[in-house]
Image (spheres, rainbow, N blue to C red):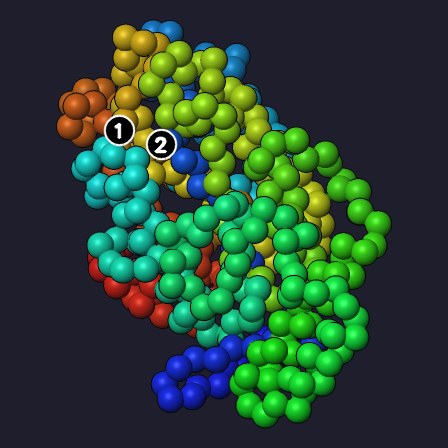
Amino acid sequence: MALKSSNKVSGSRIDFLTSEDQHQPVLVVVFLRGGADGLTLAPPHGDDAYHRARPTLAVPESGLHDLNGYIGLNKSMSSLMPLWEEGLLALHHGVGSNDVTRSHFAAQDLMEHGGQIAGGWLARFLRHHSCAQGPLSSVAIGTTMPESLRGAPGGAVVQSIDEFKIGTNDRGAIDRLRRLYEATPGPLGEAGKGTLDAISRLNSLRSGPEPEASETYPDSRLGRGLREIAKLIKAQVGLVASTIDAVGGGLGWDTHFVQSTAIDELMKDLADSIRAFVADLDSYAARTKIVVMTEFGRRVSENSSFGTDHGSGSLMLTIGQDLPGGAGVFSHFDDLSSSHLLGPGDVPVGSDYRHVLSDLLGTIDANCDMERVFPDLTGA
């Protein structure tokens, strides 16, 4: 299903689908709510200061896969190692925002807005996308619209593709609607036909046998949600961007207390879900990019409750073919001794997270003006 050029009426953008097939790139955003500890996901095992700061929480050599002699990947995330070995995984360490509040909600809003600006960064990308957007160009898996998609053209918030309906399953009523839109000239008719085409594809998907994924998804909210996104991508309904939260249970990634007992399960669920998702996409994986992000990191030193407190710089993961800058480890620190830390002992923010997003969005739409997506972003 291809996307047709947009029409403009009285300065408004009207987008619609055509019935032609087009394999356009898709971006999937996985947000780790709660401030994930990047130093546990990808431990700087080659740094003596890291081991001194975390006498009980430092990940031992036996608990990680060495990536470059300094940074490793936690073995709870072993499912991502095949992606690393295939050159499909990049780790961006020491990235973050200029937020100083340490409030989860304020930091998440700032990051999802893409700076001190109204609306969401992903919504701005979709509005300025060089191709027209259809009724299902953006889909958030969950119960509420994330701030990153606030202001997006069209879009939907669902937990399952079974929720996509037009109010009736009456074949006759749908045919009458189609004839009505076919007789309606201009963008309104095209938009109506495009919506019915998208719903028709989803109905065909629902009515057929459930295809077996090549790898089993975890029976978790993240695993189930990524499976729904894979269905949408393979159904070719015009999806350009999708978001999903990885929150786990309890406090999720906000690991102030006894971190080691909570975070291993979260990491395993994250890695297993992503690996199953990529395998499930099969040939569609070539045009799908994934970014994993969190609102801020944790302090380098463990606290008295065997956990970690809110910090600054953290970790982003990008996954897919032809990643900007290539696959590998991109670390913005090489010494975590106290003299190199930020404020009360935080990993310094060596690069603005928006640079990672901007570069990745360029692989989704090379013609999109990134200054309109992140208008207050400066530097390289």
Residue 43 left/right relative to 268: left
Amino acid bearing label 2: Gly
State how far apart marks 2 and 1 are (Cα).
8 Å
The answer to whether marks 2 and 1 mark residues whose Cβ atoms lie closer than 8 Å is yes
Query: In the image, residue 174 lies at what x, y percent?
Result: 73, 74
In percent of the image, x 64 and y 65: which residue is there? 166
Query: In the image, residue 73 lies at what x, y percent?
Result: 49, 26
Q: Secondary structure at mark 2?
A: loop
For this rendering, which residue is in front, 225 or 62?
225
For this rendering, which residue is in front, 353 or 64?
353
Residue tagged 2: 35
Residue 377 left/right relative to 121: left
In percent of the image, x 57 and y 29: which residue is there? 269
Q: Which mark is residue 311?
A: 1
In percent of the image, x 37 and y 25: which residue is there? 254
Q: Earlier in the sequence, mark 2 or mark 1?
A: 2
Q: Which mark is residue 144?
A: none
